[in-house]
Image (spheres, rainbow, N blue to C red):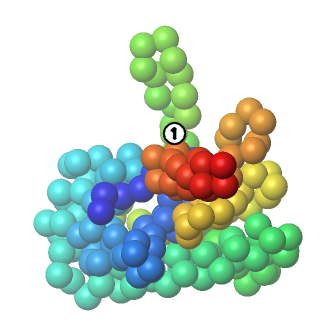
Amino acid sequence: MKFLFLGNQLALDFLNTQPVQGGEAQELLPDFGSLIDWFEAAGVLTKSDSAAMRRRWAGSDRAAAAYADALRLREKWRKEVLAWEGGAAVHGATFDELNRLMAEHPVRIRVRAEGKTVSKELWFRIQEPEDLLGPLAHSAASLFAEADRERVRKCGNCVLHFLDTSKKGTRRWCSMEFCGNRLKVAAYAARHRTK
């Protein structure tokens, strides 16, 4: 399975790296190399940054520890996001950890111009494997501080999370390709069975 970028937000896309298929959780990040691949696919790392990280850190204890920390954070944040979506307050310990991670692994903003379009993008310097936690912490902090909680949802049909950016705010499934199509086909079949 390829990486899924359906969440409209980096932290939610990170949560979505363990989808369920056929009733079983599928780990899309089985090792440090796949974690680097995900960051590159997400547009957070360049190809040259990814290659440099592999050359310097592949197989090291530091890379293994950073990988384990990333997965630990993913599961901790998954529980926090589920509770938050349901109306609970984010735990103070989560904010403390986010603040610590952002201080230890700062993320900056820079301007990017493409043609006539100018945008801001996150930028961070990769020196250690643990620096990968910086953009994740920044994104999770942005999610809790800036996103409309009413628009952050778990798909009604699967385990994937997303930030509903639709105009009406009525999106209920992760994507039309995955769950939306299945639900529409099932609803169509149900309507025709009753006729």
Outermost residue on the front side: it is 195
- Quadrant of the rendering where the N terminus is positioned: bottom left
Where residue 105 sits: x, y (%)? 50, 66
Q: Residue at left 41%, top 81%? A: 24
Is residue 188 found left or right of 44 in the rendered image?
right
Where residue 107 sits: x, y (%)? 53, 55
From where the camera sits, is residue 26 visible?
yes
Please give the residue where the numbered disc 1 appears in the rendered image.
121
Relative depth, front residue between 63 and 11: 11
What is the secondary structure assignment of the residue under circle 1? strand
Q: Residues within 10 Å of mark 1 (few under 14, many from 20)?
A: few
From where the camera sits, is residue 187 visible?
no
Outermost residue on the top side: it is 116
Q: Residue at left 73%, top 84%? A: 93
Where residue 61 sits: x, y (%)? 26, 88
Where residue 128 sits: x, y (%)? 34, 70
